[in-house]
Amino acid sequence: MERNSKKGFIFKKYEAPFVSLFDKLFEIFKELITHTSGDFDEAIDWLRQLDVEYKLTDKNYTIDDFIEDLKKKGYIREELKEDGTSGTGITSKTERAIRQQALDQIFGNLKKSGNGNHKTKYAGNGDEQTGEFRAYHFGDGLENISLTESLRNAQINNGIAEFNLTENDLVVEDAQFKAQMSTVLMIDISHSMILYGEDRITPAKKVAMALAELITTRYPKDTIDILVFGNDAWPIAIKDLPYLKVGPYHTNTVAGLQLAMDMLRRKRNTNKQIFMITDGKPSCVREKDGTYYMNSNGLDEYIVEQCYNHAAQARKLHIPITTFMIANDPYLQQFVNRFTEANQGKAFYTGLKGLGEMIFEDYESNRKKRVK
């Protein structure tokens, strides 16, 4: 008896995948804890306000239940505050979750390419397989020979009766060369990063966390160091990024550049680069006697000339500087243009929304070098 089978499509109403109430609240909590620079109590206060306005919870699962689950799952812990009183703080598990969320938010929006995360048009002897095959050439490593494809060629070319494998049958799989890259990310934490009601520091933190997560998890051969600069410059650990705040500081861009170049001098990698996120207004330098020269009125020629000199110095050391300018003032853009010209680097003039995508696209393009 014949069966009549028909092929086609079945259309039905979309059903969103199930997400627990804890997971929904946790996504919001991670965003809030980033904005509050790790202040748990403030983040929970905001979450309670959002719950009142948007009915995030129900009688079966409240914000208090959510806090208890955070404790049970190891996302928060009791700790002593700076004033000696007890309080609640986030754990390293939460810090990792925040970095992963930043990576998903920023890197997940980039255009997808072919196989692999960072595809390039250059192929040859390398350490990442491309999935493309070509004929064997003298000097190719034996480990790159595709046994399956080579045996297939031998059967086609020489027949099955008398198996014979020759050099002409050999096929190798192309590999991409991935150059190791050492990156220093400079973050401006001067007071101007939160002036006029515009929060520039939170997106800068997100970019830093996402970039750190990208490099440490997907490019372990690369290195990333992070520094912040206000009146002075100092390095910070990746784990400290969620807690980063602006201070009552001026902007000592020179100190940041000096520290960044000092960090990169110690790296063995040939390829080195500096990313700088700033509102573009240097207003402070430290003199040789340890005193500070500060001027917040416009662009001080004495200060900016030192910035240009350090940009040129980085160029001599073959360290390109990519500046991400998050302000729209024309006179500040003129400074960044001249600074970039002195370094022969790159400059992007971006709003806060597009900052993450731009910095990742630049990291993608800069980290690969053609090896002849």
Image: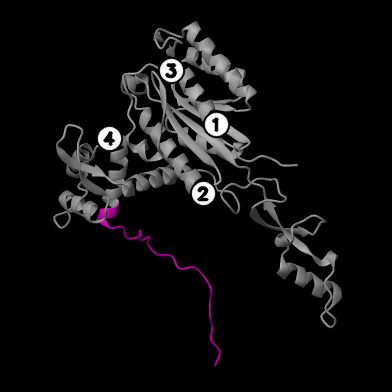
Q: Give whichever of discs 1 and 3 has the lower sequence position.
A: 3
Write down the region rendered in magenta. 1-23
Q: CA distance from mark 3 to mark 4?
A: 25 Å
Q: Looking at the picture, how far across and down is residue 202, in whole percent?
A: 36, 32
Q: Which residue is mark 1?
A: 264
Question: Mainly helix, strand or loop, the magenta region?
Answer: loop
Estimate the x, y position of residue 336 in percent, counting from the top left: 53, 18
In the picture, measured across the screen, residue 284 lies left or right of residue 264, that is left
Q: Is residue 68 above or below residue 276?
A: below
Q: Which residue is mark 3?
A: 252
Report crowding for label 2: few under 14, some 14 to 19, many 20 or more residues within 10 A (C-alpha). Answer: few
Report the Cα–Cα distance between label 1 and label 2: 21 Å
Q: What residue appears at the point 56 percent right and 15 percent down from the top-left corner?
A: 308
Camera sees residue 210: yes
**Residue found 49% across the figure and 27% down from its top:** 276
Mark 1 to mark 4 CA distance (whole Å): 32 Å
Comparing marks 4 and 2, which lies closer to the viewer? 2
